[in-house]
């Protein structure tokens, strides 16, 4: 029987090696060094965000949100930030800037720009 090989080159969930083994499939895996792991977590975050964005079905969007949370948890772990500390940071930002519950959409803003001396606009 012919063998088909797919090359992925991406961070995968921890149980995937066993899943492939159980399905009588072979996979080549490596353990990343810290810098590469962090880089791949950032790429995984974007991958999962794109999957969420492209998904149209709300029940499947929820699954994609779960994937995003898994990646965020791993990033926080690498940053040595506990879930409690992260939630405290989120609460402070929510208190200071508000949430997104009102559907407020910024169209534009106007503000004064200080003139530079010698610009000819004084």
Image: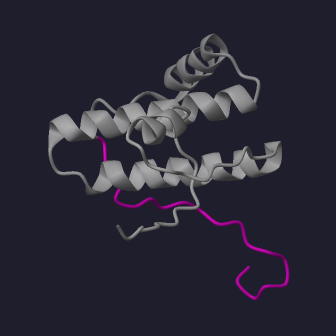
Residue 44 on image: x %, y %: 54, 50
Which of 43 and 108 lies nearest the eye of the viewer?
A: 43
Relative to 120, is 3 above or below? Answer: above
Relative to 112, is 53 above or below? Answer: above
Q: State which quarter of the image contains the N terminus.
A: bottom left
Which of 33 and 15 lies nearest the eye of the viewer?
A: 15
Residue 67 on image: x %, y %: 42, 36
Relative to 71, is 55 above or below? Answer: below
Residue 22 on image: x %, y %: 41, 35
Most common secondary structure along the magenta stretch:
loop
Q: How many marks?
A: 0
Residue 80 vs residue 50: left or right? right
Q: What stretch is highlighted in magenta?
A: 104-122
Residue 117 vs residue 120: left or right? right
Residue 27 part of the magenta segment: no
Residue at left offset 47%, top offset 39%:
21
Q: Tell me the colour scheme of the image.
A: one colour
Residue at left offset 38%, top offset 31%:
66
Q: Residue furthest bottom?
A: 120
Which of 90 and 22 lies nearest the eye of the viewer?
A: 22
Residue at left offset 75%, top offset 46%:
32
Q: Residue furthest front?
A: 1
Residue 82 on image: x %, y %: 68, 16
Q: State which quarter of the image contains the C terminus.
A: bottom right
């Amino acid at each position: 029987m012919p063998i088909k090989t797919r090359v992925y080159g991406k961070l995968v969930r921890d149980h995937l090696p066993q899943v492939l083994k159980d399905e009588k499939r072979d996979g080549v895996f490596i353990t990343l060094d810290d810098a590469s792991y962090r880089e791949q977590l950032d790429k995984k975050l974007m991958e999962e965000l794109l999957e969420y964005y492209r998904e149209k079905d709300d029940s499947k969007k929820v699954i994609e949100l779960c994937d995003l949370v898994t990646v965020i948890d791993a990033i926080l772990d690498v940053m040595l930030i506990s879930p409690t500390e992260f939630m405290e940071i989120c609460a402070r930002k929510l208190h200071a800037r508000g949430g997104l519950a009102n559907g407020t959409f910024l169209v534009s803003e106007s503000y004064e720009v200080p003139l530079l001396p010698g610009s000819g606009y004084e």
